[in-house]
Amino acid sequence: QVQLVESGGGLVQTGASLRLSCVVSGRTFSRFAMGWFRQAPGEEREFVAAISRSGGTTYYGGSAGGRFTISKDNAKTTVFLQMNSLKPEDTAVYFCAADLTSSGSSDAADYEYWGQGTQVTVSS
């Protein structure tokens, strides 16, 4: 049973930083490409960032805007999303996802496993 547990969300002011973490258990972590998505109320799920199995290749959606960095620690079976210069429009539930079949994808349909999400709220 693969489990993904996110943490690190919270309420911050505009311009602040947060680092989200997602711990994966239940299967060899190094086999997964990992992704972060977000969903705001009334909006569709949006791709934020992805990272390949080795961690050597990263991909970002337009929302990341050079402010977000995804990284992966295979020894800790954890994927991180460092978010800087946060804006109110970054407010959303952030989900991590694990993908066994691709090298990293912006398509949510490619991911087999999902966490429950962590809320990020940015006040103006």
Image (spheres, helix red, strand yellow):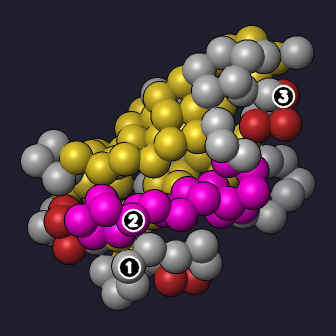
Left/right placement of residue 28 relative to residue 65 reads left
Identify the disc placed on residue 103: 1
Which residue occupies the extreme bottom position in the image? 101
The answer to whether marks 1 and 2 mark residues whose Cβ atoms lie closer than 8 Å is yes
Q: Earlier in the sequence, mark 1 or mark 2?
A: 2
Q: Give how far apart the Cα atoms at labels 2 and 3 are.
A: 28 Å
Q: Which amino acid type is marked by label 3?
A: Pro
Q: State which mark lies toward you, 1 or 2.
A: 2
Q: Earlier in the sequence, mark 2 or mark 3?
A: 2
Tell me if residue 44 comes above or below residue 40 in the rendering.
below
Quadrant containing the C terminus is top right
Identify the disc placed on residue 57: 2
Percent position (x, y) of residue 17? 59, 20
Residue name at image x 49 percent, y 34 percent: 82
Secondary structure at badge 1 equals loop
Where, by quadrant of the figure, is residue 55 drawn?
bottom left
Left/right placement of residue 79 relative to residue 46 reads left
Q: Would residue 67 be counted in the magenta stretch?
A: no
Quadrant containing the N terminus is bottom left
Other-residue count near label 1 (Cα within 10 Å), few / some / many at <14 / 14–19 / ≥20:
some
Residue name at image x 75 percent, y 57 percent: 62
Identify the disc placed on residue 88: 3
Q: Magenta residues? A: 46-64
Q: In front: 25, or 110?
A: 110
Q: In front: 64, or 109?
A: 64
Q: Give how far apart the Cα atoms at labels 3 and 1 are.
A: 31 Å
